[in-house]
């Protein structure tokens, strides 16, 4: 009984840490919180006759709580932002600033050589990056507002912000160049028509599948009635 109560309480604690958005905390607060959880888990494990399985669960819970709390520290936010910025930097047109349109569109042709509509493919990929950039900006701004007197961490925030601004500018410039290209509207028209045809095909497949299900249901119903008639006779 005690095991069940302790396990449920531990799971509730973990869910609370991971699910609910935490307020800004400092590293010392995160460490204190983790120490408290570790002590609580150790105490529960000791009371239940040194249960080895529960001790293992306690270690896992302590690790998860530590990770969750660290995510809400200024250092944790900057670390998350930098991971996002590193991922964004893998995209050629986020990472690179092109001095002229010729160099830019040569790069588009190289990167999207195998695509039927290179301009639209590049545009869609760039648009998909925007939410990630905004999320990184949010993490950096929150961390910057929370650093207090930590000079080194503030410098890290400033460096991350500078990187995010550079990536966002490159992405914005690339989107603008693509939209201004003479072939953009014609490729967009083809793309929309292709999407419409795809949607119509999917709709037709769904209708056909529904008709098949109805036919199968009728066949099964007829067979069931026949079996009942056959085996129901005396």
Image (cartoon, rainbow, N blue to C red):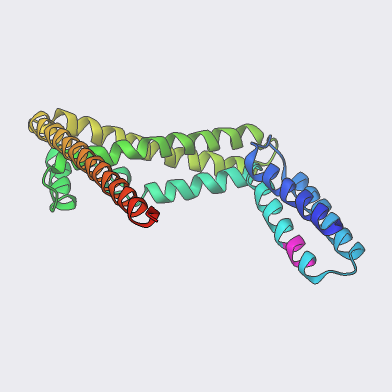
Can residue 99 be seen by looking at this rendering? no
In the image, is residue 58 part of the stretch drawn in magenta? Answer: yes
Position in image of residue 225 (x %, y %): 33, 48
State the predominant SS element of the stretch in magenta: helix
Image vertical order of residue 157 relative to residue 180, above or below: below
- Numbered range of the magenta stretch: 55-59
Residue at 86% x, 57% y: name it: 2
| Quadrant of the rendered image containing residue 53 | bottom right
Residue at 35% x, 40% y: name it: 129
Compared across the picture, whether 133 is left or right of 46 comes to left
Image vertical order of residue 58 relative to residue 20, above or below: below
Return the residue nearer the eye: 193 or 216.
216
> In which quadrant will I find the C terminus?
bottom left
Residue at 19% x, 42% y: name it: 208
| Quadrant of the rendered image containing residue 100 | top left
Can residue 24 be seen by looking at this rendering? yes
Compared across the picture, whether 64 is left or right of 127 comes to right
| Quadrant of the rendered image containing residue 49 | bottom right
């Amino acid at each position: 009984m005690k095991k069940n109560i302790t396990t449920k309480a531990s799971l509730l604690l973990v869910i609370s840490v991971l699910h609910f958005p935490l307020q800004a905390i400092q590293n010392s607060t995160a460490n204190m919180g983790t120490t408290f959880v570790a002590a609580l888990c150790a105490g529960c494990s000791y009371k239940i006759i040194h249960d080895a399985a529960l001790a293992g669960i306690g270690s896992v819970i302590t690790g998860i709580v530590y990770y969750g709390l660290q995510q809400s520290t200024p250092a944790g936010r900057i670390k998350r932002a930098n991971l996002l910025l590193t991922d964004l930097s893998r995209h050629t047109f986020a990472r690179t600033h092109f001095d002229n349109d010729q160099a830019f569109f040569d790069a588009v042709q190289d990167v999207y050589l195998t695509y039927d509509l290179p301009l639209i493919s590049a545009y869609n990929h760039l648009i998909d990056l925007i939410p990630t950039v905004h999320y990184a900006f949010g993490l950096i701004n929150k961390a910057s507002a929370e650093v207090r007197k930590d000079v080194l961490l503030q410098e890290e925030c400033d460096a991350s912000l500078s990187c995010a601004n550079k990536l966002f500018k490159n992405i914005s410039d690339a989107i603008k160049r693509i939209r201004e290209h003479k072939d953009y509207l014609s490729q967009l028209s083809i793309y929309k028509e292709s999407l419409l045809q795809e949607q119509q095909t999917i709709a037709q497949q769904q209708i056909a599948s529904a008709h098949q299900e109805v036919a199968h249901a009728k066949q099964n119903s007829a067979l069931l009635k026949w079996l009942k008639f056959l085996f129901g006779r005396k």
